[in-house]
Image: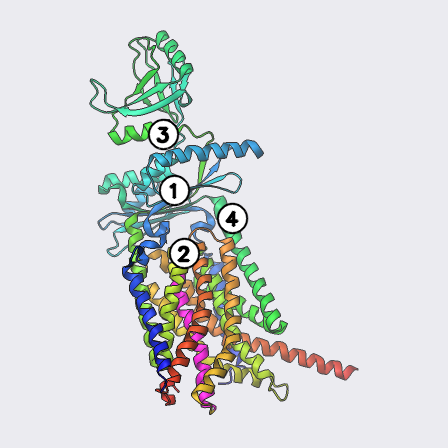
Amino acid sequence: MDIIHQKKIWFSISGAIMVIALIVALLMGVNTGIDFTGGTLMEIELHQSVTTEDIRQHMDAWDPGANINFIGDHQTTVQIRTMVDMDHRERSTLFASLAGEYSLIADDFLRTEQFGPAVGREIRDRAFLAIIIAAIGMLAYITFRFEFSFGVAAILALVHDILIVLSVYVIFRIPLNSPFVAAMLTVLGYSINDTIVVFDRIRENKKSMKKFDYEQLATDSINQTVTRSIYTSATTLVTIVALYVLGVPQIKEFALPLIAGIISGTYSSIFIASPLWVMIKERGKDRKKMFAKTT
Amino acid sequence: MKVKGLIVFLLILAIAIGGVLTALNGLVLGNTEVQPMRDSIKQGLDLKGGAFVVFEADTDATGQELDLLINQTIQVFRRRVDAMGLTEPIIVKEGERRIRVELPGVEKVQDALDMVGKTAQLQFVTPDQEVVLTGGNVTNASPVFVDREPNPVVSLELDAEGTQRFSEATGRFIGEPIFIVLDDEIISAPIVQQQIFLGQATISGNFTMEEASNLAALIRAGALPVSLREVQTSTITASLGVDALNRSIEAAKIGIVLVFLFMLVIYRIPGLVANVALTLYILLVLAIFVSLEATLTLPGIAALILSIGMAVDANVIIFERLKEEIRNGKTVRAAMDSGFKRAYRTIIDANVTTLIAGMVLYQFGTGPIRGFAVMLMIGLGVSVFTAVFITRILLKSLISTNLFKNTKHFGV
């Protein structure tokens, strides 16, 4: 398959996903997790089927617009998510009123997560900083081990992966939160891992390259490593999908960005990173030629 | 056929199997006892249940004054948490004006939060709004039963100053109530029958025994010197945590079996070798994790499962090289040597970059996310070791037996 030559197709596919996400984001906004905005999440086992309206009555005093869902094996656990910062006393009051109506015991208050607005801001800023620092660290390492052109192409592929996973989140309205960021950082590592395997082959084949045909060089290298890329993503995906299918909600929100990231990472190492590298190199070649002409 | 190769292979296989059995069931050897992995690994709040709260001091104080307030608060927290009889509470200062309280394994999460977060400012107030006693005047508090009271009461012993002031106030307001106020809430308003000279008082209020004990413990531990705001809380009941752990283990089992099958089908003999190496990989990662006394969290388990998929990568890189070299006409043995040599550099480069992500994650993450980073970093280091060294030894010893000369055995 002539991957490099068809680069416009690959770039367009990725571009289209990002544009759709951008439109969705502009029209509907981005769904952010309470750990970034501040807020409260509560999960309470009710032992019976209840309607959203029943719960909403109890929640009205704090936030009439709270997000109410039913989860658990029998959909009898209510999950309340609000951007209102409820402290222990307020949460206890809410639980007491539910406990009164559905005769609950203390242990039925399964889970709480609460973040003050200031903490949310801090977590968000740290997450952003972490991604920037990780990207710079990787760029430095690749430049040190390979050459700058590889580093730039690899980082652009990384940016691509971040944007794609982000797009998936925006399009499907999944909340962005700190597990998402941790998963993103892992995806960065994984994706660059993939990219490096391809670049490593390019580096090796370059030594025996006769003329400066970067396109052929990249195509050959991709073909030589594509089996490995597919196998590795397959084994990693198998384990993560198992985790997603069987896991509890907290782990699902971790597994999902990993799944999206692994697919995007493998895709980008083949269809984005290498074509980008060829573009950078070809440009360098043109410039050299022009330089030769003028002098 | 060389027997030595076969022995080496079987020996490593035996170590792997023995390791798995030990990890699952524990081992007793003479006086030393190895606990099963499940019991020896330290579990985070999200797996064994419990609560953590980050409090922020609501005060204008800065510098030394703030330090003092925070330290006093930590002391009060410690006394309160000790009174609850918890095993491994963590109470630490975080930043300038924050305190993080972790209560792993606490059973009554909501009650525990009640206990920890209460200001517990105890005051005895006269009808003319004068504060005669505060919690600071109390030298001891305990729950007791007294005559003509069906419910337990909290009995207080007062210090010298308190005794004197209490005696003076009870003398002045005979026939009138004295309000006992806890955190701006009147919990009892006994009518003074006679002047009380002995430094003793009781608080009654239809308490259960547990409530009386808790109140006594709060008064003994003292009031918080500063008002605190909850800036972050996380609670989870033990049953939910155990469920999360069990389901993750189930997912891990299925994931591992699928990966093993995949490797066997695609690579045959090298696949078998990779599976033995992978088994050792999992054991080593867990053993290192335990010996570092790191805390296993839900994201940590995700990292472990993810890293199993990634650890296979190093083997896939090597085996794909191996196949390529065999196809290029090399003998199995020569192919193995050059395959390993060429794959080695790729593996190092690929792992270092992921390691950079892991280190950043550790530096910037908190709680569960750190558990994820630790597991990821251990996994990366160990995977280089098992994929490169263990696989190599295993493969070499198997090839030296000359049992597998057909290149089909290598998935070519």
Q: Disc 1 to disc 3, how far (Cα)?
A: 17 Å
- The residue singled out by tag 1 in the image is B89
Total tally of numbered discs in the picture:
4
Q: What type is the residue that disc 3 sits on?
A: Leu
Question: Could you tell which of marks 1 and 3 lies nearer the N-terminus?
Answer: 1
> Dot 3 falls on which chain?
B
Q: Nearer the viewer, mark 1 or mark 4?
A: 1
The numbered dot on residue B337 is none
According to the image, label 2 marks what residue?
B291
Residues packed near mark 2 inside 10 Å, few (<14), some (14 to 19) or many (20 plus): few
Which residues are the magenta region?
A: B302-328
Dot 3 or dot 2, earlier in sequence: 3
Q: Secondary structure at mark 3?
A: helix
Magenta stretch encompasses residue B320: yes
- Is the residue at mark 3 from the same chain as the one at mark 2? yes
Chain of residue at mark 4 = A
Residue that carries the numbered disc 3 in the rendered image: B218
Task: Say whether mark 2 and mark 1 are on the same chain.
Answer: yes
Residue at (73, 81) in percent of width and height: A290
Q: CA distance from mark 3 to mark 4?
A: 33 Å
Chain letter of the residue beneath label 2 in the structure image: B
